[in-house]
Image (cartoon, rainbow, N blue to C red):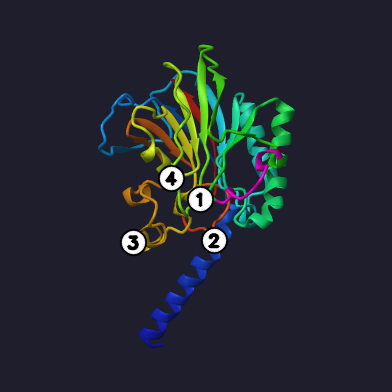
Amino acid sequence: MSPVYVILIILAAFILLTLIWCLAEPFFLDFDRVQLTLSPSRDATSDELSIKKLSLLNKDINKEPDLRIFFFSDVHAEFCAISSKRICNALTEAQKSSQIDAVIFGGDIANDPDKCAVGYRYLNKISEWCKGYDIPFYGITGNHDITLKGASEAAGFTSLDNRAVDLTSRTTGSKIVLAGVSDSGRLNRVWKQMPLKRGSEPVILAAHNPDNLLHLDKDNRPDFMLSGHFHGGQMKLPFRFEHRFLRTKDLLPKKKVVEGAFDINGTTVFISRGLGCGVLPFRLFSAPEASVVEIYI
């Protein structure tokens, strides 16, 4: 057999295996633990963009967190291979370890608004689990949700769109503000401002698109932010193709900020890879993710 045929066979086998993995990876759930602490530069007011990659776990922390939040995002229900039962099982596992203080959904119920009923059924299963343990279930609007009416009621969560609620630190009993902003969609995008801070209380902001942080008033930024939207890249192609040519309107991916924990302009940010898939039901080196996020004040 000539070397050319050998190379073609190897190339064909590689392409076939990659396609098989792209179809298989959406079924593999990463259920991880994340520890977020206050940024030492949270009071900075510089206009210059500052980004620092953070570890998901901090080996120097040896105390109880102020909050334990179960966070998941981007269900995209018609292209989601992770069942609501698996999420409820992950919630049960997290609850057994140490009580969860809140469950937060980071937006995008379905790709197609006409398929939203599938997403509502999905989220209602999680809502039922939360009610059984008397744990609040919050959510925000993603860019795929903007045409849905009464989505929070239909899905069984309490909307955080452009409003704030109070949570209580499990260690000190002090108030921690949980705020949210709605998404306006990709066309004619309008970046929403965070509800105004109240005194010195720490603020956690849920915002579907992490880029929202870059458009907040510099004197009204949150201490922590939870986001999704980028899917961790979803298809991690050579030369960062997906961010150079497909997500041209998003700013943070150009800075290699698509998943994980970061200190961005003094805000400690966690970006989830989400559960479902976007335009196609494929993932490549970016497995679905649900997380227990521990907040330390």
Vertical position of residue 173 compared to residue 287: above or below: above
Mark 1 vs mark 2: give the one in front. Answer: 1
- Report, in whole angstroms, how far the alpha carbon at label 1 lies from the one at label 2: 15 Å
Q: Is mark 4 on a helix, strand or loop?
A: loop
Judging by the rendered image, the residue that carries numbered circle 2 is: 279
Image spot of residue 32 (x, y percent): 52, 38
Q: Is residue 63 left or right of residue 160?
A: left
Image spot of residue 246 (x, y percent): 41, 61
Label 4 CA crowd tier, 10 Å (few <14, some 14–19, many 20+): many
Q: What element carries label 1?
A: loop
Q: What stretch is highlighted in magenta?
A: 144-153
Image spot of residue 161 (x, y percent): 56, 36
**Of the residues shown, which amino acid type is indicated by label 2?**
Val
- Report, in whole angstroms, how far the alpha carbon at label 3 lies from the one at label 2: 20 Å
Residue at image point 53% right, 17% down: 169
Q: Is mark 2 on a helix, strand or loop?
A: loop
Mark 3 vs mark 2: give the one in front. Answer: 2
Judging by the rendered image, the residue that carries numbered circle 3 is: 239
In front of the other: 151 or 119: 151
- Report, in whole angstroms, how far the alpha carbon at label 4 lies from the one at label 2: 19 Å
**Of the residues shown, which amino acid type is indicated by label 4?**
Glu
Prevailing secondary structure class for the magenta stretch in the rendered image: loop
Mark 4 vs mark 2: give the one in front. Answer: 2
Residue at image point 53% right, 49% down: 143
- Report, in whole angstroms, how far the alpha carbon at label 3 lies from the one at label 4: 17 Å
Judging by the rendered image, the residue that carries numbered circle 1 is: 185
Mark 3 vs mark 1: give the one in front. Answer: 1
